[in-house]
Amino acid sequence: MDKFFKLEERQTTVSREVIGGITTFLAMAYILAVNPNILSVSGMNWGSVFTATAISAAIATLIMAFLANLPVALAPGLGLNAFFTFTVVQGMGCSWQLALTAVLIEGILFIILSLFGVREAIIRSIPEGLKKAVAVGIGLFITIIGLNNAGIVSTDTGTLIGFVNFDLAHSAAIVAILGLIITIVLYGLNVPGAILIGIVITTIIGIPFGVTKIPENWKPISVPEAPHFFAFDFKGIFINAETGSFSLAVLGKFFVIFFTFLFTDLFDTIGTLLGVAEQANLRDENGNIQNAKGALMADAIGTVAGACLGTSTVTSFVESSSGVAAGARTGLASVVTAAFFLVSLFLSPMFALIPSAATAPALIFVGYLMMKSVVDIKFDDPTEGVPAFITIMVMPFSYSISKGIAWGIIAYVIAKCAGKKIKEIPIITWILAGIFLLNIIFEAVK
């Protein structure tokens, strides 16, 4: 074990890795409740998504352990699952089966790109400011979803959107606010698993408020429900469901969905890996992430496995940094985290008790964590700051991650041209801007 995971070389021990792996699980276990809550809105079965979430997280995290030997855990990502449900299914009117098809193809393409090192090249060609802005925009998008899920904000307040009155008629909102306060306090005290503990305490607080409902004959342990195995819709990629004929419009819509999954996952994974590698001092002599190809392959295979099981894109979790802070330095910690995800398979009734008001604080707080990238955006340079602002602003206000990315890239090209900095625009950015502009025009005239 010491030789395989290089424990002595990285100046760690088995006990440190075990503690680090448990800490990472506690920090990100909220996804077991949040992911089914979000994807079930698209029409998927809650229990099936729960099973898919736990298994796909375990598979991807084990691959990370054995291929990359890094203390990084993976699971279906927040933001990506929100895009899946609220943009693709509810906003675009697509079936969840078609959304899963896009996730599958994205994962397969990622495997190919990872094998040939193309993903790193793509990352280098996308403007740094837009990478940061995408993370911030997704954070705000997740936040507004959390506020809405808890009933904290409403359109029935006499304004476009506003806070409700915190009275007993809005008990879910009260419970969510209390949960957010608890999460902030726990996180401020550096309590491991602050987000998960916050969810648990909020769920308990919700019982006397009538927000948390315990069914009769409830049992905490049960046999896992079968996931949505291979529930794909390949015909839906290019066939109009109403006419049964080939449609360029349908194909164009699918490309936008596919590319948004692709683009968002690219930066989620790379950003997390860079952050964890920096914190754990896991860079090589050239400053690059150790075993980067294996790490990128882990999220690619995990995404394919997740799609086959019936869940949205699997990606690296920034909460892995909590395990690193607890001492984790190798893939052994990832093995421990994966083991806990498998054990959680038999505890789905416990997670089913958790109401949206209890997971909302987690969504809002993760929004805060994703906001940290805003300080690295060069707002004093209009050619960088304006596109970043457009990206950040469009995502929550249009309720669409894809629109934020599209308008941000278009704004980047316009801003650089106006600032006479055309040479700073990468070729791939020109191509993406053209594709997104054509899609906007097409949507307007169809």
Image (tube, rainbow, N blue to C red):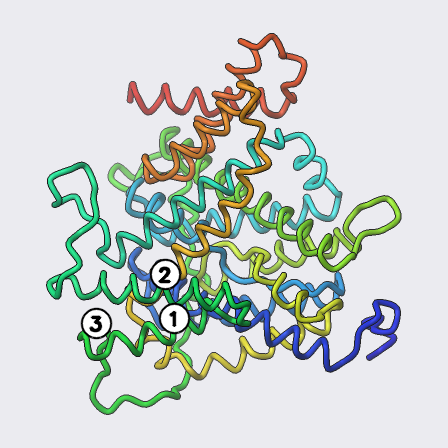
Q: CA distance from mark 1 to mark 2?
A: 8 Å
> Label 2 near label 1: C-beta < 8 Å?
yes
Q: Vertically, is 263 above or below 108?
A: above
Amino acid identity at mark 3: Val
Q: Left or right of 412: which side holds 336?
A: right
Q: CA distance from mark 3 to mark 1?
A: 13 Å
SS type, badge 2: helix
Residue 13: give x, y in percent of width and height: 79, 78
Q: Quadrant of the C terminus?
A: top left
User: Looking at the rendered structure, which numbered label has been put on residue 361?
Assistant: 2
Name which of mark 1 and mark 2 comes first in the sequence: 1
Q: Left or right of 155: which side holds 89?
A: right
Visible in this render: residue 74?
yes
Visible in this render: residue 98?
no
Q: Along the line of sight, which residue is nearer the eye, 11 or 234? A: 11
Q: Vertically, is 381 above or below 361?
A: above
- Residue found 68% across the figure and 65% down from its top: 324
Residue 203: give x, y in percent of width and height: 31, 74
Amino acid identity at mark 1: Ile
Residue tagged by mark 1?
Answer: 199
- Residue found 11% across the figure and 40% down from its top: 158
Residue tagged by mark 3?
Answer: 211
Q: Left or right of 69: which side holds 243?
A: left
> Label 2 near label 3: C-beta < 8 Å?
no
Q: Quadrant of residue 138?
A: top left
Check disc 2: other Cα within 10 Å, few if <14, some if 14-19, many if 20+: many
